[in-house]
Each structure stands twice: as C-alpha cells, then as structure tokens.
Image (spheres, helix red, strand yellow):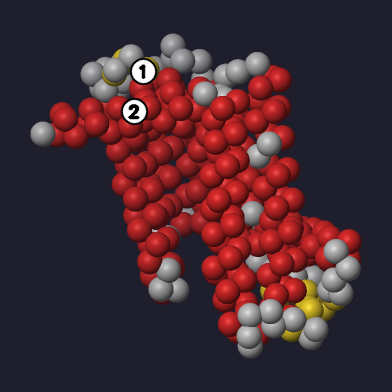
Amino acid sequence: MIENIIWLALGLLVIASIIPHENRLKLTIAGAGWLFFSVHWALQWQHYFGLADYTNVFLTVLASAFSVIIGIVLIKQDKSLLGNINGVSTMTSISMASTAAAIGGLSYFVFSEIPSMNEWLISTVVNQTIWLASVFGIMVTKTDWNIIAVNGYRVEIILACTAIESIALFIGIIASVRAPFKRLAMAFLVSVPVIYGLNLIRNVFVVDAYGMTWFGDPDTSFYVAHTLIAKVGSLIALFVIAYAVLKILPEVLDMIDGILNLVRGIFKHAG
C-alpha cells in the first residue's frame, strides 16, 4: 500500500490538471492529491536519516508540510486564500504548481519506482558516459550494466547519476506554463538537453578523477571530484539554467509569487 501512495497522489493531480478551472471538483481532487503527496514525503525522512543525509531529511519534512498546507487550502476552498493577493491569482499559481507536481512527479517516479525503466535509464547513461569518455580520449571500461571503471577503479552509476531529478523538475515546471509553443520549446532546449549533457560530462570527470587519482589517493580523489567540484558545478549550472528558463517563461515567476503570497496569507490568517 505504501508504495502505491505516490501513484495515487500523481493520478489525482493529473486528473485535477485536466478538469476545467470552473469545475469545483478540480480543487477537491487536487487537494486530495497533495495530501497523499504529503504522506509519501512523510514516509521518506527515516530513509535519509538512516543514511545521515540530514539535508534530505529536512527537505522531505518541508515537502510534506507544504503539501499538507496546499491540500487543506484546496479542499476547504477558502476564497480569501484562493483569490487575488497583491495582484497575483493564487488559484492560478496552485493550479500551475499541481500540474508541475503531476508532470514532474511522473517524469521522475516512472524511472524511480519501475525497475525496468530504472535499469534502462541507468544503462543508457552508462553507455553514453563511456562513449563521451572515448571522445575525450579517456579509457573507460564497462564491467557490469551499471558499473564503469577507469584504471581498475570501479564506480557504480545509480539513479542520481542520471540527473533525472533536475530534468523532471524542469519538465514539470515548463509543462505547467501556458505560453506559446515556441517559448516552451526554447525553455525545454536550454534546460533538459543541457542538463543531460552536462551530467554526462560530470560522470566522465568524476570517474576519471577517481580512477587516475587526480587529487591524491582514490577515496580523496572521488570525494573532491564528486562531492566538492561536481556538486558546486552542478549548482552553478542549475542556477544559470533556471535563470534562462525564467527569462523565457516569466510566467513561472507569477506562479512562485502566488505560492509565496498564499503562504503569507495562511500565516496571516493563523495569526
């Protein structure tokens, strides 16, 4: 039952995204979807706590709390919170956020929760990482469907090494915006293919730095390449990509403003 919660949440959000805005059932279904979404995230923190990944513990708890708030507001259909606040329609913003969560969630969890899709994506990234390494003149060997090696040092490619989280996020955000196809296509092209390509370069860099011990012993080389350089580089790249998408689709800023105004409105009512 627990593993089915995410599919129930996404299914409800997809249905809500299709229902016309004037149908009040749209809000109730979307609210139920967000509440089930909150249950999913609430069940994840223990996994990350066991890994001592306290950043993700915080993020999952925050995501669960946010989903609960959105779900309750939508089910109660409080007009004071779903109207125009500071000139921005919170109803439109929540509708966009629901669509983004539905499309982005499907884009991620299809590969996260379905073993055959998970294996296909990882093996594809492995093969393309090896190809790109050969382009750079780096000798990389494949020792298993999900393992590559440089100089005898093996690295397992996991789902996080495919950049599917970031790709799904941008797919969801872009799909939630009502804009001319040309702008949507431009936003897609400057985000999804670029993220995927940069991730392949990142994989090549990490495995070569590890295998060739660029920064001292193998463990230190992996830590410096993967945890320090690659992560900082990824954050900078995502910031630049997000800026480019916002320039192309300023409607995304309206969605963010609407959500922030909603949160402020909730705290104001609570006070």
Return the residue found at the far front: 215
Amino acid carrying label 2: it is Leu
Secondary structure found at label 2: helix
Helix, strand or loop for disc 1: strand
In the depicted structure, whether residue 119 falls above or below residue 97: below
The residue carrying mark 1 is 88
Q: Which mark is residue 77?
A: none
All told, the count of numbered labels is: 2
Left or right relative to 229: residue 33 = left
- Displayed quadrant of residue 71: top left
Q: Residue furthest bottom?
A: 217
Relative horizontal placement of residue 203, taking residue 137 as reference (left or right): left
Note whether 6 is above or below 222 in the view shown: above
Q: Residues within 10 Å of mark 2 (few under 14, many from 20)?
A: many
Report x, y in % for residue 126. Answer: 78, 64
Query: Please, which residue is most extreme toward the top here?
Result: 22
Residue 47's place in the image compared with 172, above or below, is below
- Residue drawn at the location 31% of the way across and 47% of the way down: 65
* Image point (19%, 34%), residue name: 267
Tell me the quarter of the picture where residue 55 sits.
Answer: bottom left
How packed mark 1 is, by other alpha carbons closer than 10 Å (few <14, some 14-19, many 20 or more), is some
Taking depth in this image into account, of 244 and 270 the one nearest to the observer is 244
Task: Tell me which residue sits at (37%, 25%) in the image.
Answer: 258
Three-letter amino acid code at the position of disc 1: Val
- Of the 4 image quadrants, the one containing the C terminus is top left
Residue 119 horizontal side relative to residue 31, left or right = right
Q: Which residue position is annotated with label 2? A: 74
Image depth: mark 2 or mark 1 in front = 1
User: What is the spatial separation of the Cα atoms under label 2 and label 1, in whole angstroms?
Assistant: 17 Å
